[in-house]
Structures are given as structure tokens and as C-alpha cells.
Amino acid sequence: MADAKVIPFDDDRSRSGGGSRPARRRTGAAGSGARGDGATAAVSALPGGRLPEPSEGAPEAPEGAAAGAAAGAQQPRQSHEAQEPLPSAADEAGEAGGSGWDRRIAGGLAFLRRRVTGEYEVDEFGYDKELTDQVLMSALRPLAEKYFRVEVKGVENIPSEGGALIVANHSGTLPLDGLMLQVAVHDHHPAERHLRLLAADLVFHLPVVNELARKAGHTLACAEDAQRLLELGEIVGVMPEGFKGIGKPFGDRYKLQRFGRGGFVSTALRAGAPIVPCSIVGAEEIYPMIGNAKTLARLLGFPYFPITPTFPWLGPLGAVPLPTKWTIQFGEPIPTEAYPPEAAEDPMLMFNLTDQVREQIQHTLYKLLVQRRSVFF
């Protein structure tokens, strides 16, 4: 398989596939313009289609022959009309449906051809927009819509253009909340924007997961990559709690952990991008973590090894998340463009903005929990 061609991230070129020429309809020689012979030609050559009077000495044509010649002159038109009836509404509907399926099949085959030949584009971070839209989002969408039934609120608070930093709480033992957040932005934003998540280095050390994360637009959680994406006008997602949030015990659910040292605020200030707080309810209960096998976690190189009511007791079946009802709410954006460039070096300002974002997320979590009828409904 050929290697994918790497292009600059801000290149917005698209490829258009060539369509096939429609099949031309062939007509037979017995059409309306075809010439006849014998008696038929004589009949068509005279006004009214009458046979010529027999001359003296010439044999008189039988009456049956004249009748047959007249019938032969009318036969081509009657058979032509019988062979080509007017199309019915049902036929037209069937043809339209068939062409729709043809286009889908042709599009799928063209997609596979580009995958095999390497004729697709990725940006400088490895993001494959075509693969994300057509495959990865299609695989995650049923999980969001049918299984977790994610309800999205306040998506209009995400800017329609330009960069923005979405800061969300992190929970759930496994990072499914980040994937559902990506689907929420992708499917619900009116401008169809894409979320670029900042992930921990562990994600990029795991086989297969590493490649899928890069293709989906995720990148390492470092200030340089985050600032580069924001300056390019991308929507960037960060979960500052990290492993402290996703691996906390079930008894501490919906209690935000420490937000680090405010590095995300400094990045937003340097890029002049607004900060959009985001609160996610429902992820805490998908894997209720009642214990942590720390020794096993150290042996495997994981930050924690969760013990839940179903895992590891039920084996692979215990890894199936519980079908909780989710709500994702985006809060009012906090602007940063009014701050001077040196503000990113002010520790007190970073502390205040970090605390403001954290308090807004925590307050929204409590409000959503009060409004929630049930964990599963």
C-alpha cells in the first residue's frame, strides 16, 4: 500500500470523482425513418395510400395483396408504440432509488480505491478528515444516539469560525466521554465543525489506538500542538483533570479534581482564542469504579487498573459500559483576545481564569444533576 501524501494543515483542497457517461439508447433500422420495399413503398408514395390502377396487359393485383400491403404500411408505427409505453410513476421511483444506491456503491468503491492507492490527504498532525467523517464518526454515532442517547445543549456557544478551546470534565474509567464530545461537536454544530482533542501520551503508545487517534485528529497534550491548532482556527478540546478525573473512585463522582497548573489558559491567551467550558453528565456511571488494583496497574504500565461490579468478574462482558443517559452542555465562552501578549506569563491571571473555568463547569454539573430524572432515563 502506498504511503499517504502529507499536505499542509490549512490546505482545503478537495478531490472530485469523475462520473460515468450515461448509456446511449440504440434504435433499430425499423424506425419511422426506415424505407420500405415492394408494395409497401408504392402505397406510401401515393396520396391517401392508394394502389396504382393496373395498366392494360399487366396482371391485376389480388384484393388480398392490396389489403396486406395497406396493413404492412401501418404495422411499424403500431408495433413501435406497443414496445415503448409511457413510464409509470412507480418505474420512475424505482429508477431514482436505483441511481441512489448506485451512487452510494460507487462512492464506497472510490473510497476504498483511494485507501489502497494512498490517494488521500492528511494534515501535519496525521488527521484524516475523509476517514473520520465516513468511517470513524459513522461507527461512533450509533453509540452516541442509540446507546447513551446524548443530549447536547448550548452548542451555539462554540464559534462558527476561528479557533476556540473547549475545556471539559473527565470521567468514566475509560475515555469514552472524549469520543462522545467529538461526535457532539461534529454532528450538532450548525457549521459542522471538527473537534481536535488533546490526548495523554499513553494513547500514542498503544498499538492500533495510536493510529486511530491520529487519524481522528487527536494530538499530544502539549502547549505547542494546542497553540498551533488554535492559530490555524481549529476547535481544540482539553480535559485538564487527566487520569485523576477519569480514574477517580465512584464515591467521588462529579467532583472535579485539580485542573493542573493552568497550562490550557496560557495556551488560549497566546492564541487569543475563547475558552468554552463544557460539562458532561452520564459518563461517571458507565463503569462504576469500586476498586483499583495498583500492583497490577504498575506491572502493566497503566495509571490505574479499575475494578467495577462487572469487571474483571465477567471477563470481556464486564467491559461493556452501562447504558446511561448523557447530557453535554457547552457554557458561555470566556473571551481572551482583550488580554495583552504578556498576560500569558502572569501566574495570578492564569490562576484566576483557571478557577473561573473550573467553577463554571462544576456549577453546571450540579445543575444538570438536579434536573436529571434518572441515571438511565
Image (cartoon, helix red, strand yellow):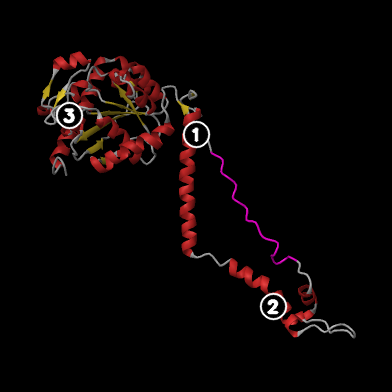
For the residue marked with disc 3, what is the amino acid? Gly
192 or 79: which is nearer to us?
A: 79
Other residues around mark 1 within 10 Å, as few (<14) / some (14–19) / many (≥20): few
Helix, strand or loop status at disc 3: helix
| Percent of width and height locating residue 257 | 17, 23
Local secondary structure at mark 1: helix
Q: Which residues are magenta?
A: 17-34
Q: Quadrant of the C terminus?
A: top left
**Which element type, helix, strand or loop, lies under badge 2?**
helix
Q: Going 73% across and 83% down the picture, which residue do you hit? A: 64
Percent x, y for residue 127?
A: 41, 27
Mark earlier in primary sequence (2, 1): 2
Which label was assigned to residue 315?
3
Q: x, y (%) of residue 102?
A: 48, 47
Mark closest to the chain's N terminus, 3 or 1:
1
Badge 2 amino acid: Ala
State the residue in front, 288 or 178: 288
Name the foreground residue: 261 vs 63.
63
Residue 149 belongs to the span the image colors magenta = no
Query: Which residue is label 1 attached to?
Result: 113
Residue occupied by mark 2 = 71
Q: Quadrant of residue 157?
A: top left
Task: From this view, report whether residue 120 is shown above or below residue 294.
Answer: below
Q: Answer with mark 3 or mark 2, whichever residue precedes in sequence.
A: 2
